[in-house]
Image: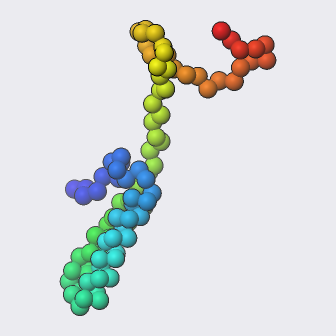
Amino acid sequence: MQLIDPNHPAYRRLWVRIAIVAVCFGWAAVEIVGGDPFWAVISAAAGAYAFYMLFWTFKSQPEVAEPVVRPDAEEEDEPAEISAEKPSKDGPAG
């Protein structure tokens, strides 16, 4: 059973993964200072599991770029995409 799915898009950003792990270990520190070792161990275990899933086994997924559509493009079967190609030496094509 997997509690954290590292392939979920919410975990794509590094700062989100760092924040989750930091909050778990921070709460464990709060429980230690407060004198409740049981909840400190539970929070630290959650932080260790989150670290393992979000950093150790995490494989970054490449972000999918959506095509840019010109607003003045005539309706066709497929939307016209703006090309980032460099013009040739002979001049612009078209």
| Rendered view: 48 above or below 64 | below
The residue drawn where x is 71% and y is 20% is 87
Residue 90: x %, y % from top left: 78, 13
Q: Is residue 81 visible?
A: yes
The residue drawn where x is 46% and y is 19% is 71
The residue drawn where x is 79% and y is 17% is 89
Total numbered labels: 0
* Chosen colour scheme: rainbow
Q: Is residue 52 visible?
A: no
Q: In the image shown, does 39 or 70 lie closer to the viewer?
A: 70
The image quadrant where one finds the C terminus is: top right
The image quadrant that residue 43 belongs to is: bottom left
Q: In the image shown, does 94 or 2 lie closer to the viewer?
A: 94
Left or right for 13, reference 88: left
The image quadrant that residue 47 belongs to is: bottom left
| Rendered view: 12 above or below 94 | below
| Rendered view: 85 above or below 44 | above
The image quadrant that residue 33 belongs to is: bottom left
Q: Residue furthest right?
A: 89
| Rendered view: 75 above or below 5 | above
The image quadrant where one finds the N terminus is: bottom left
The residue drawn where x is 43% and y is 8% is 76
Left or right for 20, reference 35: right
Residue 30: x %, y % from top left: 29, 82
Residue 82: x %, y % from top left: 55, 22
Q: In the image shown, does 54 or 18 lie closer to the viewer?
A: 18
Residue 86: x %, y % from top left: 69, 24
